[in-house]
Image: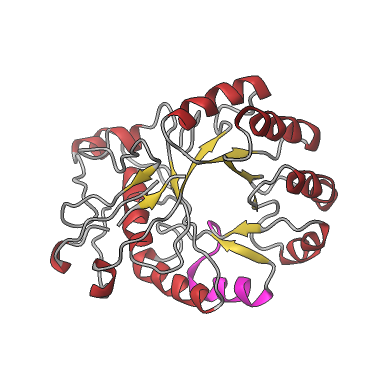
Amino acid sequence: MTVNSAVTAWAPAPVSQFPVSTWPSGTYGQKRLACLSTDCLEEHRNQPVAAYAGGVSLGYQTPDSLVDEARVHVELGYRALKLRIGDNVQDDLRRVSAVRKAFGEDLTILTDANTAYTLDDARAVMPALEAQAVGWLEEPFPAHDYRSYREARNYACLPLSAGENHYTRFEFDRVIEDGVITILQPDLSKTGGITEALRIAALASAWKLPIHPHTSMTALNMAAPVHFLAAIENAGYFESDVSRNNLFRDELVDRQPFIVDDKGNTRPLEEPGIGLEVDEEFPAAHPVIEGAAYV
């Protein structure tokens, strides 16, 4: 199967070997697929993948710098870019406007506020983002702030997205029932694994809601969503990490967790499991410290 990039492609494999999908300018064990219907091995469809632009750990860029970085990924074939916002309304809009002006209407622009907005910020920014044909506003508020999401829905006809900080199908059940957040983004490492994510996708499918899984910083978390997207009927974008310095992507495993072709597509790795082998020397050389973590 192919997954669009904004990336995607899937090649059939025996069930016993079914492998289990961008953040520019940022830094951000292995699970085997437990149970999937063989129907997914026979499906062939395209699903989009998003490139995440705008800086994560390095802060916010100027509009010109952001456009320069975005151009690199557009030229590589990405058809959707997710821009980090949540700095302040005026500068956020300048960045979005600069990217839209540089690449025109053919590029899908998505935005992520990383829970940084107040209701006043959302009231000011959402109509302007809608005017720039932005595809969604992600996590303007913390995951538990259902009241603010419900209020902000009235500010514009701009879809609200969330899910990376919602856990298991039981929290997604409330999100779906509320009918406010219509773009669902479970993180396979945080929401309960592949099996639980499949349950969430099935629940969302009953409401005709798309699934755009969130990608965390490790290669394991990047490879798994491609397989997950290839196995569900309401698949959306694969979120591709193209940060410049990510050792958890580049050195933890034996190969790149995804490859984007010149048409902005990727495909699940064809080797057993999720298609990766962990370099056991890497975690030994970088021991974990006490505290919450996920891969």
Quadrant location of the N terminus in the rendered image: bottom left
* Total marks placed: 0
Q: Residue at x 51, y 79 (%)?
A: 206
- Left or right? Give the position of 268 relative to 207: left
Residue at horizontal 17 percent and vertical 68 percent from the top? 15
Residue 253 image point, x, y percent: 24, 40
Q: Please tell me whether residue 171 belongs to the stretch shown in magenta.
A: yes
Answer left or right for 223 relative to 294.
Answer: left
Q: Position of residue 271 (x, y in %)?
A: 16, 52
Q: How is the image coloured?
A: secondary structure
Decide which of 74, 228 is in the foreground and name it. Answer: 74
Tell me which residue sits at (55%, 60%) in the image: 163
What x and y, as percent, mark residue 173? 57, 76
Nearest the viewer among 175 and 76 is 76
State the predominant SS element of the stretch in magenta.
helix
Q: Which residues are magenta?
A: 164-178
Specify whether residue 273 is in view. yes
Q: Is residue 62 visible?
A: no
- Decide: is 150 above or below 100: below
Left or right of 89, for residue 187: left
Question: Residue 76: which quarter of the image?
Answer: top left
In the rendered image, the vertical position of residue 164 relative to residue 247, given as above or below: below
Q: Is residue 231 magenta?
A: no
The location of residue 170, given as percent across then percent down, is 53, 76
